[in-house]
Image (spheres, helix red, strand yellow):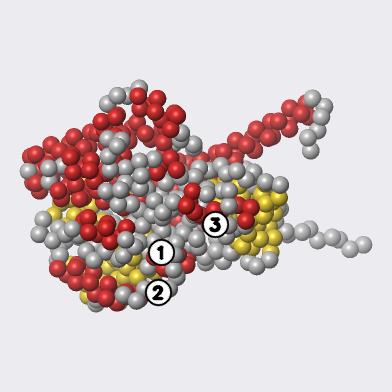
Amino acid sequence: MAVKTPSLRRPRPEVIVIGAGIAGLATALRLATGGMSVTLLERHSHTGGKIRTLPSDAGPVDAGPTVLTLRHVFDALFACAGTRLDDHVTLIKQDILARHFWSDGSRLDLHADADATTAAIADFAGGKAADDFQRFNASTARLFAAFDAPMMQAPRPRMAKLIPHVLRQPTLIPAMTPLSTLAARLKRQFSDPRLAQLFGRYATYVGGAPHLSPAILSLIWQAESAGVWVVKGGMHALTDALTRLALDRGVHVRRNTHVDRIDVIGGAVTGVEINGGEQLDADTIVYAGDPRALATGSMGAALTCVAPQTARLPRSFSARVHSFAAIPSGVDLAHHNVFFADDPRSEFDDLMAGKIPRDPTLYLCAEDRGQDSPPCTQERFEIISNAPATSTLTPPTDLDLWHHQIMQRMADMGVTMSPTPTATTITTPQHFAEMFPETQGALYGQTPHGLTAALQRPTAQTPIRGLWLAGGGTHPGAGLPMATLSARHAAEAILRGRTSTSKSGQTAMRGGISTA
C-alpha cells in the first residue's frame, strides 16, 4: 500500500497583515510572539515601506526616515519578542541633534544636553533668547508628560476623557495655548524670529505648516530632545533586523504580493484576493497601509465605511527626496542639518497652494556622519524638501530646473558636492503616489491642520469585524515611533480578543456546552 506523503502546505493563517512597513513588521512580530499564525504581505520586493534605499557608488543610501527617536518604543518591541534591540542593530546616540544654517551665515546646534543647548542659544542670540528657550523647554516638557499616556499610549483617545485630565492640571492650559497655532505660539515665545522658525519646523515632521497646525505640536521638541539615534549602516538596517526576527518567530513573509481586494461577508472579513486571483482565507486582517485606500473603496466597496474622514480631509505634505553619494566640501556638517528658507511663510503659502516652494528649507542628512568613525571620502547624502501631495502620477516637468536650484542654494550656503549629483535619484510625490496607492503621495496621512486634528485620526479598530488598522496614517500618527505604537495598539487588541474568546469557550465547555 502506498504511503501518503504529508502535506507541506502551510496551515491557514490566523492573521494576515497587509504592508511590511515598520507598522506591519511590528504588528506581525507582536502577533507571532503572542502565538498566532501570521502571514505578512508586501507588494514591493523589499520590506520596510518608506524606509527604503537607492544604490550609489558609496553603497545603499537611505531615501526615507533618517534618525530614530523615542528609543524606548523600539526597545519594547524587541523585548516583546524576548530579545534586545542592541543585539540586532547598533544605535549611536547623537550629541548634536541637528545643525541649523541661515543664509546670513548664522548657525546653531541643538544638543542632547539641555544646558548645552541653552548655552548655544545664548551665544547665538543672547541671554533673552536663552531664557525664552528655557521657558519653552519647561512648558513642552509638561505637555509631553501630561499627554503621553492619555494620547499616544491610549489606543482610543477621547475628548471626553482629555478635558477632565486637563482641568485637573490647571498649568497645562497656558502651556497648551489651545486656541493658538504653532506659529503664533512660537512668535510669542521667542523674541528671536530665527528660533520661532526653527521650532516651527516640527509641524513638518507630521506633514503640516506651522501657521495652520495646533500649538500642542510644540511637544515634538521633547521627543527629539529625549535622544536622537543614528542606526549604524543606515535606517534600513532596523527594518532588515525586524524582518529577520519576524521570520525567526514564524511569520510567513510574502514579498511581491499585491492585495487586490479584502473580502467581506456579513460585516466580517473572510480573507484577501492577491496577485489577480489567488485567495487567502483569514478571519483577522491588519491593514498597515494608508487607511485612505480603504475609505476610497480601492480594496473593496464594503470597506468605504472604514476611516471615511481620510477620503474627505486634505492630505499632509509630501516631499522631494534626493539620495546620492558625493565628496562634500565647505561648512562642517553634522548627521542632521537644516538650511532654512529666507521667507518661511512664503514656503508654506506655496505648499498650501499646491506649488513647489520657490524658497524651500532643505534638510540635509549626511548619512555617514555621527557614526563614531570618520566618514569615507565619498559620503552618502539625502536632501529632503517639502512638496505638496498630488493625485497625478504624471512626472513633473521642472525636475532638472529644481535640482539646479537646490544645488545652487546649497552652494550659496556653503556646501558643494563633487561630482554634482544628477536629478535621476530624486524621489517625487508622484513616485510616492505610485509606490503607495491611494495616498496621493502624502507621507504622513491626513493633514495635521486644525485644533482637533489628532483626534480625527482613525484608530486600530474598524466597523468591519476582524479588520484592524496600523501605520502612520492611524492613531497616534506619523513617524516611526508613532507607527510602531499603532502596531502595539492593534496587536494588543487582537491578542486580548483571542484570549477572551478562548476563555469564553473554556467556560462554555465547563458548563457542558461546546461552542465549537
Residue carrying label 3: 296
| 290 left or right, relative to 395 | right
Name the residue furthest top: 168
Q: Residue at x 60, y 35 (%)?
A: 496
Q: Mark 2 belongs to which amino acid?
A: Pro
Residue identified by numbered label 1: 390
Amino acid at dot 3: Thr
* Percent of width and height locating residue 251: 59, 53
Using the numbered discs, state the Cα–Cα distance from disc 2 to disc 1 in whole angstroms: 11 Å
- Where on the picture, by quarter, is residue 231? bottom left
Residue at point 20%, 50% (across, down): 197
Q: Label 1 crowding class (10 Å Cα cut-off): few <14, some 14-19, many 20+? A: many
Mark 3 or mark 2, earlier in chain: 3
447 vs 105: above or below:
above
Q: Label 1, secondary structure: give it.
A: loop
Residue 381 appears at what percent x and percent y?
29, 65
- Looking at the image, residue 159 sits to the left or right of residue 176; the answer is right
- Under mark 1, the amino acid is Thr
Foreground of the two, 379 or 197? 197
Instruction: Say which quadrant the N terminus sits in.
Output: bottom right
Viewer-nearest of discs 3 and 2: 3
**Mark 2 highlights which residue?**
395
Residue 266, image x, y percentages: 71, 47
| Residue drawn at x 12%, y 42% as measured from the top left | 191
Tell me the crowding category of disc 2: few under 14, some 14 to 19, or many 20 or more residues within 10 angstroms, Cα based.
Answer: few
